[in-house]
Amino acid sequence: MLKTYTYPKFAYVQPQEQKERVARRYPVVIVGAGPVGLAAAIDCRLHGIPVVLLDEDDTVSIGSRGVCYAKRALEILDRLGVGERVVQKGVSWNVGRTFFHEEEVFNFNLLPEPDHKRPGMINLQQYYLEQYLVERCVELGVDLRWKNRVVSVQRMSDQVRLTIETPDGTYGIEADWLIAADGAKSPIRKLMGLEVEGKIFHDRFLIADVVMKADFPAERWFWFHPPFHPGQSVLLHKQADNVWRIDFQLGWDADPEAEKKPEKVIPRIKAMLGDEREFELEWVSVYTFQCRRMQEFRHGRVLFVGDAAHQVSPFGARGANSGIQDADNLIWKLKLVMDGKAPEKLLDTYSSERVAAADENLMNSTRSTDFITPKSNTSRLFRNAVLTLAEHHAFGRALVNSGRLSVPAFLVESPLNTADEDEFAGRMVPGAPMDDAPVGLEDGGKGWLLDQIGGQGFQLLYFTDVAERLGDKLERLRELTVDAVPVEPVVVSEKAGRLDGARVLHDLMHLVAKRYDAREGSVYLLRPDQHVVARWRRFDAHKVRAAVARATCNI
Amino acid sequence: MSLTLTPNFSEPGKRYFRAFSPGDDFYEMLIDAHRDLDDEKSAMLNAQLILLLANHIGDLSVLREALARAREGAV
Ligand SMILES: Cc1cc2nc3c(=O)[nH]c(=O)nc-3n(C[C@H](O)[C@H](O)[C@H](O)COP(=O)(O)OP(=O)(O)OC[C@H]3O[C@@H](n4cnc5c(N)ncnc54)[C@H](O)[C@@H]3O)c2cc1C
């Protein structure tokens, strides 16, 4: 029981087919209602796919886990319909301070490039995120089944059979496709005899959530080797409801049971905050972590997402953030395959693209971990040398790695991309996650590019000065909408305008054209998950169709 | 030439999408080079590395400035 949050208890209802003792077949079954399974379920519903979501528990994430949700995850949550709630409830912060011994060595301001809808990062307790996602699932008619534990998996060529345990006994279910979102310990992975490889870090961290009415600003403070916790690191972060999260590095030899006791934890916090500050303990736990991933995220009709597929250290907040991107990558592909519009091979690119992203995440979080907790005298010496140089020199500050911001991978190696044949500057290369920018809407309102794009199908951005002058090009653009894999043309116009048969976005501040290095007639082909997949200086319907075929493995 | 004190890492032909990547690439290479060496061997590696880089830079005015900055932070 927390002081600031009451865990919801979701009702268990005996499944109809268990009562009737018949196994039913479903197009998609998802196991695990953590942030990733919930996000996948919502995305399925938005694509019109009926979905069953099973979870062995009947509440949200217990205790203190995920805190930081990064820009890309927030953009996806916007598309799923919970972004605004998460941002409203969450704490926005921009300033980070880094201390070494007693001194502040430097501070940074995350303040991202202006004119993006979402900030670099917000802080929010994971249980709020999950609660909002559950409510959205209910709204969209996800068949959510609490207290349904998967106990066996049987793979057939055209389906997967599950045995599920409920408070009323067991029952069977059949799925065309199974999404395993069952977390780091993934019982599905184990039941299928699959390996997950990587390394365990020999260190322990104490997490203490404290409630205090602090007059500290909402900033991230990171201490290397502070006087109140010599030889180790400490992180302070603000969450919603005046809950502050403190992470103490303890070292491998610490006794986790002893360290969790309030008589041990409270003096540690007092040493840090000073004796006079009042606080209440909300949550305490001790954790170790691992960096590892499965070889492949697709195994026939079973698709692994989130922590089940890959696990990273928490430095840099990449767990839930990257898991939500797994779902974003997977569901549109699954929909095309289910509709017979793309071969199953497309799902292999879910695996290869997200394996590449996972490797980048693993690399970045491993590097942060190595910097924060050096494993040799030399490594510690270099770390301290960097911190010393950081006080005076910009290059030193750039090397301080107390956790890099979680950012999406550029899928530049993806086989779905069509290579550039024309010259473009900037970073919106094929495979790039799209940059946001403000746009004017047809009703005169102001909106955001990323709210107008993505989700259902492929889209083609057509850049022009005056939308009305498109002439017969419009006809050829519109023909793309009736293809087997349709492409919606969206005109980005320097001047406000309107067209019959195509949406027009007004490039209010000329930032879309700038960020995409677009000129009159430039076109960008976009995937449903808001990644650039091809671009040209002039529109050629044949080339667009060939690129769509490539992006859906239809060649 | 004066001593460069702003971030300056890159690799020819390699495209970086994130500002922190080239510096982190270097730092990982540096720590990896020391893997499994005892303190004495690590110190030897460091000394040779300084000599190699100093010769590569060559310009004594730059080296003089670097030595002065490094000494400042060490004492
Ligand atoms: C200390 C700490 C700090 C973190 N900080 C961050 C952060 O700042 N940002 C971030 O993005 N991430 C962070 N993470 C990581 C984040 O918590 C996880 O990555 C995230 O919860 C993974 O989501 P998931 O849905 O894949 O798995 P989980 O959240 O683990 O969900 C798995 C679900 O599967 C269910 N389940 C398991 N087995 C079965 C079964 N047999 N049958 C039915 N259901 C089953 C479970 O009940 C559970 O609900 C942190 C983690 C820790 C420990």
Image (cartoon, helix red, strand yellow):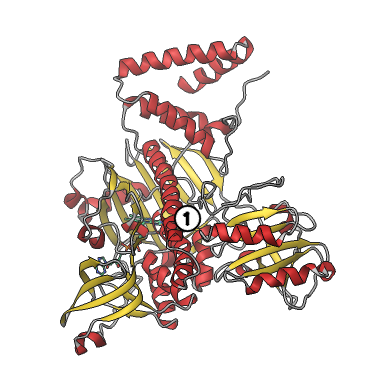
**Location of residue A63 by image quarter:** bottom left
Chain bearing tag 1 is A
**Location of residue A479 by image quarter:** bottom right
* Residue that extends furthest to the front in the rendered view of this protein: A555
Q: Is residue A426 visible?
A: yes
- Check the picture and name the quadrant holding the C terminus of chain A: bottom right
Q: Residue at x 80, y 57 (%)?
A: A520
Return the residue nearer the eye: A471 or A207: A471
Q: Position of residue A531 (x, y in %)?
A: 57, 58
Q: Position of residue B14 (x, y in %)?
A: 57, 35
Q: Is residue A226 visible?
A: no
Return the residue nearer the eye: A286 or A450: A450
Q: Position of residue A221 (x, y in %)?
A: 45, 48
Relative side of A107 to A65, left or right: right
* Looking at the image, residue B72 lies above or below residue A530: above
Q: Residue at x 80, y 72 (%)?
A: A497
Q: Which residue is mark 1?
A: A216
* Looking at the image, residue A403 lies above or below residue A160: above
The answer to whether mark 1 is within 8 Å of ligand 1 is no
- Check the picture and name the quadrant holding the N terminus of chain A: bottom left
Q: Position of residue B31 (x, y in %)?
A: 39, 28
Relative side of A298 to A465, left or right: left
Relative side of A438 to B18, left or right: right
Considering the numbered disc 1 on the image, is that residue within a helix, a strand or a loop?
loop
For badge 1, the amino acid type reads: Phe
